[in-house]
Image (cartoon, helix red, strand yellow):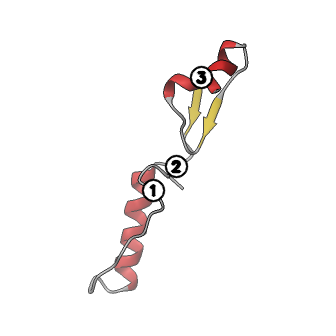
């Protein structure tokens, strides 16, 4: 559908969660997901004094949010 929009002359861009690169003209990534993850793990480690176990639940492997 986005490709059809681009073919019709509509400017298509994605923000935050990227769509397929062939279906957009521009993507704006406001934050680096890896840096966010590293920061969150560092914060959790600090909260538990770097001892014990943690579990991470993610809705999907593709969801950056």
The percent coordinates of residue 51 (x first, y second) are: 26, 86
On residue 22, which mark appears? none
Judge the density around disc 1: few (<14), some (14-19), many (≥20) Cα neighbours within 10 Å: few
Q: Nearer the viewer, residue 10 or 39?
A: 10
Judge the density around disc 3: few (<14), some (14-19), many (≥20) Cα neighbours within 10 Å: few
Secondary structure at numbered mark 3: loop
Secondary structure at numbered mark 2: loop
**5 to 55, vertically: above or below:** above
Q: Residue at x 54, y 56 (%)?
A: 65
Left or right of 11 on screen, residue 35: left
Secondary structure at numbered mark 1: loop
Q: Residue at x 41, y 64 (%)?
A: 39
Judge the density around disc 2: few (<14), some (14-19), many (≥20) Cα neighbours within 10 Å: few
Dots 3, 2 in contact, CB < 8 A: no
Label 1 sits on residue: 60
> CA separation, marks 3 and 2?
19 Å
Dots 2, 1 in contact, CB < 8 A: no
The percent coordinates of residue 62 (x first, y second) are: 45, 49
Task: State which tag comes first along the sequence, 3 or 2.
Answer: 3
Label 3 sits on residue: 25
Single out the mark in the foreground, 3 or 2: 3
Residue 14 figure quarter: top right
Task: State which tag comes first along the sequence, 1 or 3.
Answer: 3
Label 2 sits on residue: 31
Single out the mark in the foreground, 2 or 1: 1
Q: Nearer the viewer, residue 30 or 57?
A: 57
> CA separation, marks 1 and 3?
25 Å
């Amino acid at each position: 559908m986005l490709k059809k929009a681009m073919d019709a002359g509509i400017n298509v861009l994605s923000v935050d969660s990227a769509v397929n690169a062939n279906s957009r003209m521009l993507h704006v990534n406001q934050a680096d997901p890896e840096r966010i993850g590293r920061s969150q793990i560092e914060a959790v480690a600090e909260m538990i004094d770097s001892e014990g176990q943690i579990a991470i639940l993610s809705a999907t492997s593709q969801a950056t949010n």
